[in-house]
Amino acid sequence: MPAGNKKHILVVGAGPGGLTAGMLLAHRGFRVTIVEKNDRVGGRNAEVNLDGFSFDLGPTFLHQKFCLDEIFAEIGGKSEDHLDFVDLNPMTRLSWGDTSLHTYSNTGRMSAEIERVFPGSSSGFERYMRDHAVKFRSIYPCLQRPYHKLSSYLSMSLLKALPHVLTTRSVHDVLGDYFDEERLKLAFTFQAKYLGMSPWHCPALFSILSFTEYRYGVFHVQGGLNRISQAMADSFEKLGGELRLQSPVKQLLTSGSNLTGAILESGERINADAVVVNSDYGHAATSLFGDRNVSEEKMRSKKFSCSTFMIYAGVDKLYENEPHHHILFADDYKANVSEIQSERLVSDDMSVYVRNSCVTDPGVAPAGQSGLYILVPTINTRHGFDWDSHKEEYADKVLKRIEQRTSMRDLRSRIITKKIISPADWQSGSIFMGATFNLAHTLGQMLYMRPHNRYQGYNNCYLVGGGTHPGSGLPTIYESGRISANLICEQFGMPYQVVDLASDYLRDA
């Protein structure tokens, strides 16, 4: 196709989904422009720079790495050509009071660790892994298909998966089939937090989340996971794509059932043949479509995930005896989760996740120092809790809990710089209700019932990111970008080749 005849695709937002779609579409012969409101790429996968320390804003590890590998393979490359991966083993330390369990992606090591901490329980783990290999093979193909048509439900892949999907059981219920020890159940259900949900309410199909970790591992990227977004942006520009930072969109332009482009806050108009929206779904749907915006009232009637309270702390020492990942469970985890799901109560008995990546990746902090990434799942902003008045006080409670439950007894006195992001701060950053994991992943908000990859009501508007199918989490967000890119190719009659690396992993599951 001559350059002057290339269809122009506008991508709004340089998050992981927008960058994925942009890379693939540029590689397939489209003229692609990505506009990003911030001064850097990544969205919630961006870098936070703080006085010489480098942090990830959001995701801190990569699972199902083969999803990312497929995206780079589709443009003729390898992810390892751009990124330095570290396969973490142990993956995470899980702590309940004085009891700790290390998790491994090696079945033999994990069985031995379970026997060490919870004698007699390893057979349940081995049975869980066998059963969930079958379950994962059934469900995974469903995450690669669009569901903008009801006829998608007639696909053979979904029909095979329906027994795992159409059930009222929760993730916690499923783990009860394998373990009697409550703490061990939590070791395989806390991953529901990646969706911002309670394991007691998260649909049973998501019990595959822990399986993917224990089977395929979790990876750190040297320099931080934000390096993935930067590598994607670099690849996109090498493919001829145009990347424009600090270019916020004021409004998308509509003409009947089509989008014709966008007007930037600067007043500039960009015309396009199709638009990919990578903004937070709730924010975009209520603010970017002009007189066709969804009302805030209607959007708030949907179920949203929890939020997160974040502390990025630069520390003047290296905590060499602390693990890369550490999860400190609340004393009463079920009550903690229930308070979060109430969307009203901020837990004093909170669960805390700490990433101490400098033990693996010393380059993200000045020599001899470390940057601690601290995340506390908490309520979204639905009911208006006054975070501005309480965030310093709450940060101190969180830091005190870390001091009490780890070897970092002197943590507060060692902090030389820090940044706090509260749910209110997430909201002011254009995340609807501060729900950092987007729409909740309930049965009524999945597959066809989730906002479609081809946005309903438009012929040429496509959604990517955690607010559309397949859902939250980096691998599924990459998949949303690929699904939308494929749909655009089909709309305009552009051929494309699919790279399938996952089948080998599924066969070996």
Image: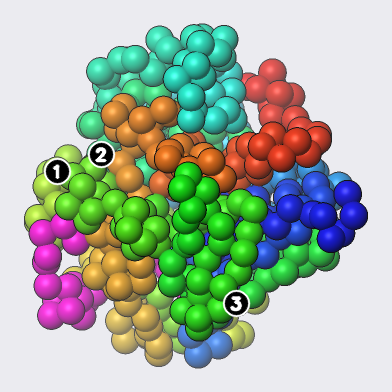
Q: Nearer the viewer, residue 166 or 320?
A: 166
Q: Is residue 11 left or right of residue 99?
A: right
Instruction: Characterize the local packing of mark 3: few (<14), some (14-19) or many (20 or more) Cα atoms within 10 angstroms.
Output: some
Identify the residue under disc 1. 338
Residue 186, by quadrant, is top left
Label located before the other in sequence (1 or 2): 2
In the rendered image, residue 171, in percent from the top left (x then y), is placed at: 32, 27
Q: Is residue 80 magenta?
A: no
Q: CA distance from mark 1 to mark 2?
A: 8 Å
Residue 507 versus residue 8 in the image, above or below: above
Rendered image coloring scheme: rainbow
Q: Which amino acid does the dot numbered 2 rest on?
A: Ser
Residue at disc 1, secondary structure: helix
- Residue 198 is marked as 2
Q: Nearer the viewer, residue 183 or 99?
A: 183
In the rendered image, residue 19, in percent from the top left (x then y), is placed at: 64, 57
* Span of residues in magenta: 371-396
Q: CA distance from mark 3 to mark 2?
A: 36 Å
Q: Nearer the viewer, residue 454 or 503?
A: 454
Identify the residue under disc 3. 245
- Residue 117 is marked as none
The answer to whether one can see residue 283 in this image is: no
Residue extending furthest right? Answer: 2
Q: Residue at x 48, y 24 (%)?
A: 149
Residue 450 versus residue 349 in the image, above or below: above
Q: Nearer the viewer, mark 3 or mark 2?
A: 3
